[in-house]
Image: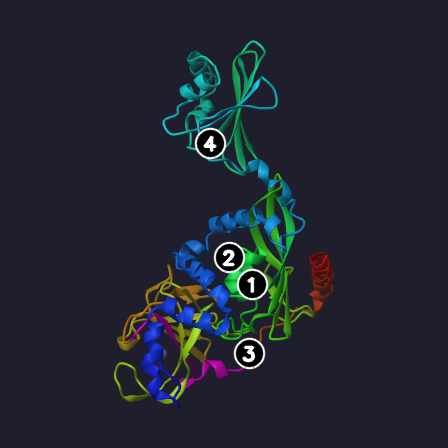
């Protein structure tokens, strides 16, 4: 339930009306924090962020983001290095149209599939007789794959000097292509699957608008930006501590096929400077095969609890022992913290634990209560709905999405009401000292340093190169 601070009760309803729309809330934040010139652009980012949260986290989206990011390196001073992205033009297809191009030599023909096209019409376009369609389809069972045409797909024909088809080739996506090659008896079908090579890519960014917008400008995909926020989520409060001029460096795995980025792997190392203080993280996979993030000197980035269960949210009400309830209009303690964010924004479990409740609870509306060990309990109220697989009696992992921002129960606008209990007593989650997780085991320290030191050195070097080149 949203509130004002106890010092200024009359302000509350006004503030809250603003928060009633998640967009209004973020825009008001934008107005407070960001240069006015960025506010217009901020709106467009918001509409992107309002897409289904589940979709945003899929690999597909990640791959799409990666492709998008590499399509614009020329315009961005922070383009990734070491990804060979310069020659991605080759794969950029023009607006599909029924054009027959003459390319390379007289024997090479290319056709783009348009609406209404069949293999026969395409053969006709390159001057091949319709009978040859039947011939090739009959030559190999799998050749039928050539008749499953997609709008915009490109077919490449190689013709022999006497006008016969010697080779037909088509790229299905970034990773797969199919071909038919003439032999003595007929045609041989081939399906070629490219294995992506894994590169590491580097990105540097400065916060000059919102985090998501600045990250996008630097060339970091949405899902990598979310990853970065969770890597540093124990130390940096992304809801209220981000400032103009904050900086980040990220080295991450990038999957590349023929010089084109087709997807991303995990963040390998990252650095985030928040209000002058720099945090560093390195991914390390221990001998048991478990991966986790550590500081450069081997302390765990993970703590028993995440500081903020919602990324990119604004605190709309703090913990207070006495305030006027916005709906009940009575003085009541506000035993939690409210985070205003657009409807549908993911809410994460603050720590590993057992789900005591995932259901409706009176004025809290759709609520999740998690028990963390014997001492701690967290509560998440007013959710729009629960994430898949989150149910009473189940378990959740730290950082797992448990539900989405909504305004169910006694609530005047989309926000998360978040409570934290220690031994059954409500405490201010923002005032908690977060317990730390274990550092690198002594036995693995040398191995860890052998991996982390080169990554640290590379970030340093890449940034220096980048800054030197931007000064010209
Ligand atoms: Zn509340």
User: Would you say the beta carbon of the disc 4 residue lies within 8 angstroms of ligand 1?
Assistant: no
**Discs 3/2, front:** 2
Disc 4 versus disc 1: distance between alpha carbons?
36 Å
Give the residues drawn in magenta, as a range. Answer: 411-433
Disc 3 versus disc 2: distance between alpha carbons?
27 Å
For the residue carrying disc 2, how many other residues have a C-alpha within 10 Å: few (<14), some (14-19), or many (20+)?
many
Q: Position of residue 220 (x, y in %)?
A: 56, 56
Residue picked out by circle 4: 153
With 332 as the anchor, is 41 left or right in this view?
A: right
Q: Quadrant of residue 453?
A: bottom right
In the image, residue 47 lies in the stretch drawn in magenta:
no
Residue picked out by circle 1: 228
Vertical relation: 305 (above or below) 10: above
**Is mark 4 in CB contact (under 8 Å) with mark 3?**
no
Q: Work out whether mark 2 precedes mark 1 in sequence or the reverse, and give the earlier one.
A: 2
Quarter of the image with the C terminus in it:
bottom right
Q: Work out whether mark 4 precedes mark 1 in sequence or the reverse, and give the earlier one.
A: 4
With 268 as the anchor, is 27 left or right in this view?
A: left
Q: Which mark is residue 223?
A: 2
Determine the residue positioned at 45% across, 19% down. 125
Seen as rendered, the residue at the extreme top is 162
Determine the residue positioned at 35% across, 74% down. 18
Disc 4 versus disc 3: distance between alpha carbons?
55 Å
Disc 3 versus disc 1: distance between alpha carbons?
21 Å
Vertical relation: 419 (above or below) 446: below
Residue picked out by circle 3: 435
Determine the residue positioned at 47% across, 26% down. 99
**Discs 4/1, front:** 4
Tag 2 secondary structure: helix
User: Would you say the beta carbon of the disc 2 residue lies within 8 angstroms of ligand 1?
Assistant: no
Please state which of residues 290 and 190 is positioned toward the viewer in this rendering. Answer: 190
Q: Work out whether mark 4 precedes mark 3 in sequence or the reverse, and give the earlier one.
A: 4
């Amino acid at each position: 339930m949203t509130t004002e601070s106890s010092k200024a009760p009359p302000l509350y309803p006004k503030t809250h009306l603003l928060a009633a729309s998640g967009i209004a809330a973020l825009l008001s934040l934008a107005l407070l924090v960001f240069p006015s010139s960025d506010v217009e652009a901020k709106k467009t980012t918001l509409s992107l962020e309002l897409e289904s949260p589940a979709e945003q986290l899929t690999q597909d989206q990640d791959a799409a983001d990666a492709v998008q990011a590499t399509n614009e390196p020329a315009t961005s001073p922070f383009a990734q290095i070491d990804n060979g992205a310069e020659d991605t033009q080759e794969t950029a297809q023009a607006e599909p149209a029924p054009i027959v191009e003459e390319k390379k030599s007289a024997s090479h023909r290319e056709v783009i599939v348009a609406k209404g096209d069949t293999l026969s019409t395409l053969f006709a376009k390159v001057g091949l007789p319709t009978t040859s369609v039947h011939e090739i389809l009959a030559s190999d069972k799998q050749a039928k794959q050539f008749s499953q045409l997609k709008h915009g797909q490109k077919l490449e024909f190689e013709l022999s000097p006497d006008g016969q088809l010697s080779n037909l080739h088509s790229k299905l996506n970034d990773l797969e292509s199919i071909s038919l090659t003439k032999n003595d008896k007929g045609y041989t079908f081939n399906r070629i699957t490219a294995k992506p090579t894994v590169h590491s890519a580097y990105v540097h960014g400065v916060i000059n608008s919102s985090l998501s917008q600045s990250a996008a400008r630097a060339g970091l995909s949405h899902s990598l930006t979310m990853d970065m926020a969770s890597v540093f989520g124990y130390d940096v409060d992304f809801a209220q501590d981000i400032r103009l001029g904050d900086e980040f460096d990220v080295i991450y795995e990038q999957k590349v096929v023929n010089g084109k980025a087709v997807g991303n792997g995990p963040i390998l190392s990252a650095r985030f400077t928040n209000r002058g203080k720099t945090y560093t993280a390195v991914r390390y996979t221990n001998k048991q095969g478990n991966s986790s993030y550590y500081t450069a000197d081997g302390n765990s980035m993970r703590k028993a609890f995440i500081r903020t269960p919602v990324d990119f949210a604004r605190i709309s009400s703090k913990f207070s022992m006495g305030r006027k309830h916005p709906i009940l209009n009575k003085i009541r303690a506000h035993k939690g913290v409210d985070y205003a964010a657009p409807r549908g924004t993911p809410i994460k479990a603050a720590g590993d634990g057992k789900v005591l409740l995932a259901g409706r609870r009176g004025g809290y509306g759709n609520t999740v209560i998690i028990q963390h060990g014997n001492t701690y309990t967290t509560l998440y109220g007013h959710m729009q709905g629960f994430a898949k697989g989150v149910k009473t009696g189940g378990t959740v992992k730290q950082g797992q999405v448990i539900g989405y921002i909504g305004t169910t129960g006694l609530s005047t606008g989309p926000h998360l009401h978040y409570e934290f209990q220690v031994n059954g007593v409500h405490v201010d989650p923002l005032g908690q000292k977060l317990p730390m997780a274990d550092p690198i085991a002594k036995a693995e320290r040398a191995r860890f340093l052998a991996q982390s030191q080169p990554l640290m050195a590379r970030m340093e070097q890449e940034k220096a190169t980048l800054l030197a080149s931007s000064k010209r």
